Amino acid sequence: MRKGKYLITIVISLFLVDAAMAQETYIPWENGKLQVNKGNRYLQHENGTPFFWLGDTGWYLPARLNRDEAEYYLEQCRQKGYNVVQVMVMNTMPAINTYGKWALPHGFDFTNIDEEGEYGYWDHMDYIIETAARKGIYIGMVCVWGSPVQQGKMNVEEARVYGEFLAKRYRNNPNIIWLIGGDIRGDVKTEVWQSLAKSIDANDDNHLMTFHPRGRTMSGVWFNNEKWLDFNMFQSGHRRYGQRKGDGDYPIIENTEEDNWRFVESNNALEPRKPVIDGEPIYEDIPHGLHDANEIKWNDNDVRRYAYWSVFAGSFGHTYGHNSIMQMKKDGIGGAYGAQKTWYEALEDPGMNQMKYLKNLMLTFPFFERVPDQSVIAGTNGIMYDRLIATRGNDYLLVYNYSSRPMEIDLTKISGSKKNIWWYLPKNGNLEFIGTFDNKIAKFSLDEGFHYGNDRVLIAVDASSDYIDTDWTRLPDAQEKIKK
């Protein structure tokens, strides 16, 4: 019965999609191609419109979803505010999709890849990209996952040929972002990744490119000086504090596994400076450390913390992930890492539906002037879950407090003799005006006390600025303002 209900839901939903999209869909590339902002912190379109990357992880979308399922999934992403979906173009080698079609039927000879009268592997990839485009969604294309490359299944020349094929096929699609690598260190098979990246770069100057690295590492460690690397990506990974697992050389400081903000700070110290994003944080409903299904699972509180920590530390956006959605688990298909729900059930999980509140908050204020600024926090900051992260513009500041512990905030860090102050709830987007304060260090606390997951954003705005009205209980859709 559950599967039957799901199929009926998809059929009904598809009838409603076209009419709804015609009135509501924001097509970001109507503002021009994506490019790096002149300050090298953020992404924008050619006409200067800001782009806040809100990604979902749909790794197995090309392999496991058919056309109707792909349409439904992408429409759900659109409705939930996502504007990027990260996928594995080839999750393995040889790669096969739900229609039984192979990605490389003639090896790396793509001369006759499109056979007349056949809906092949690449036709299905085309459909996914074009469907996403109708919904205003970019596809983050991990060209091939790292493991088959590490196993020697693609050499330097094959990578060059494959990159040329991909670039020429998709360079005129407006909604492509290239992701080289795929859960692998950049010093493993470096020559293959360089060949793939340079081949795409030589044949496509329309799209941005980065490298998706191994857990607890960042692309800039290996490729920051490469012309083809437009922005950096790190994978903060899936381990909790102290979950070392007996690794040898450890790429991070001990007991900082959850401190994804540290990668942002490391990136900001690199020269040349490039924008940065957490392309794979913890996933909702996945076990701590991934591999033991009996472990505690990460929940919506955790995914919010990772998102706000990273963005407030200076990331230009964030990618969310869910255990069941990333592997497109169906009844009888998938189920790695202890996944129990189907992908379509997981679409209703709280974390999946809370990320849009972060995107809306960041687009409410002047986008490009925002900087991370820990000097906003007066007195002693906390560590681990008690750490406060602050960011500000010229006349506004935001402080993320995961536990809502009492804090002292230096309101003199922004303009204005008086400051209007609100609490913003990342769980539901609710807004609560708490008063107008003098221009000084002020103490803030919640009546209900503090505990982990009772997270709040403190918003302080120069009282002479009009970004938020004091009688609002929710923020309006900032995307609507951008569309105008």
Image (cartoon, grey):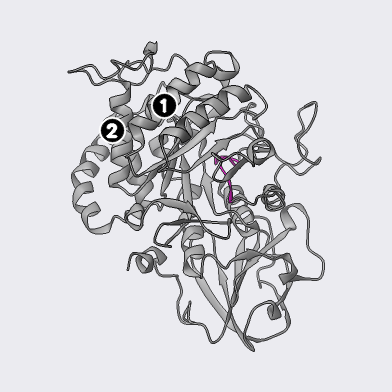
Q: In which quarter of the image is residue 386?
A: bottom right
Question: In the rendering, at what x and y percent does residue 153 appear?
Answer: 53, 13
Q: Residue at horizontal 37%, vertical 46%?
A: 137
Q: Quadrant of the N terminus?
A: top left
Report whether 45 appears left or right of 244.
Answer: left
The dot on residue 377 is none
Judge whether 83 appears above or below 454 on screen: above
Specify the amino acid type for callout 2: Tyr
**Looking at the image, is mark 2 or mark 1 earlier in the sequence?**
2
Identify which residue, 39 or 415, lies in the foreground.
39
Question: In the rendering, at what x and y percent does residue 103 appear?
Answer: 37, 18
How many residues crowd mark 2 within 10 Å: few (<14), some (14–19), many (20+)? Answer: some
Q: Quadrant of residue 379?
A: bottom right
Q: Residue at horizontal 18%, vertical 52%?
A: 19
Label 2 belongs to which residue?
127
Specify the amino acid type for callout 1: Glu
The span picked out in magenta is: 275-285
